[in-house]
Image (cartoon, coloured by chain):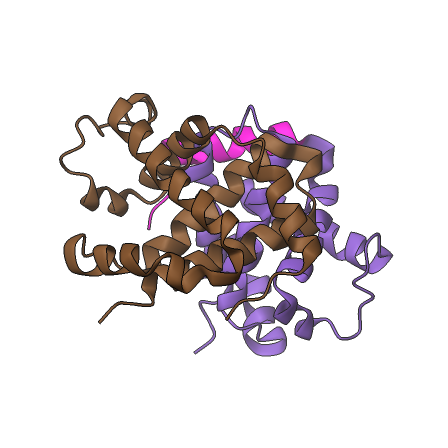
Chain colours: A purple, B brown
Amino acid sequence: MVLSAKDKTNISEAWGKIGGHAGEYGAEALERMFFVYPTTKTYFPHFDVSHGSAQVKGHGKKVADALTNAVGHLDDLPGALSALSDLHAHKLRVDPVNFKLLSHCLLVTLANHHPADFTPAVHASLDKFFASVSTVLTSKYR
Amino acid sequence: MVHFTAEEKAAITSIWDKVDLEKAGGETLGRLLIVYPWTQRFFEKFGNLSSAQAIMGNPRIRAHGKKVLTSLGLAVQNMDNLKETFAHLSELHCDKLHVDPENFKLLGNVLVIVLSTHFAKEFTPEVQAAWQKLVAGVANALSHKYH
């Protein structure tokens, strides 16, 4: 799967519109994921995952910042995400199925807050973006 | 068998009562065909699918989306009995339509996203969870008669 020039434009523009809310959306996506897919909580036994949790807020910002960085390097996602890729492969070892669950919740969150901008074409590009990021993050698993 | 709590049923019906079947159905099916273009393989006779704009404006896609969501209405009314409710449709999708059940999951998730755009603040994590449970139950029920 390749991100076309149009995909890259859609992704950059959509992420630009999110502006300063990225951290908030990251946290909301995590909250949705923990609630809708309880098995994902198994990776966070050390977290308070209740609504409004400071740890989830903090982690949401971390995830959002990494995605913002990725948006800035759409021409070289493997390079930009190399360290995170190592981390997920050797330390975190989150089962690959979970990246789809978080990606879906990120889409639900973005659709929720920006319905007018979340056109079918933007939806498609963002879905591809999250899938590409997920592929890079699991690329060194074996 | 899937069991829905009273809260989950309320979360589902409170949203469902406000859904415009044609609008949401057309949008859901249209987005499925755009975001996962390989799903167009089942709609080769539906006319112009050459662009996102063509797909979203295609009246046959809109009508078929309405048909699909109308069936989902059956699910909302029979949440405690999904397998039996969808037995016939399951056979149809296997024997006549030859649809890979993976597509039911894709459609269910696209529907959740469409509901999220329409219902914003009302579409809380709890409401999303109830709907994910319903669409997963429907996907399961539709795959149940496959052989």
Above or below, comparing residue B115 to residue B101 in the picture: above
Residue depicted at 28% across the width and 42% down the height: B37
Residue depicted at 63% across the width and 59% down the height: A36
In the rendered image, the quadrant that contains the C terminus of chain A is: bottom left
* Horizontal and vertical percent position of residue A120: 42, 31
* Horizontal and vertical percent position of residue B56: 34, 25
* Horizontal and vertical percent position of residue B145: 28, 67
A15 vs B144, nearest the viewer: B144
Is residue B75 in view?
Answer: yes
A77 vs B110, nearest the viewer: B110
The prevailing secondary structure element of the residues shown in magenta is: helix
A33 vs A127, nearest the viewer: A33
Residue depicted at 28% across the width and 22% down the height: B59
* Horizontal and vertical percent position of residue A71: 55, 41
Residue depicted at 53% across the width and 67% down the height: B2
Above or below, comparing residue A114 to residue B32 in the picture: above
Where are the magenta residues, as a range? Answer: A1-18
Is residue A74 in view?
Answer: no
Above or below, comparing residue B137 to residue B40 in the picture: below
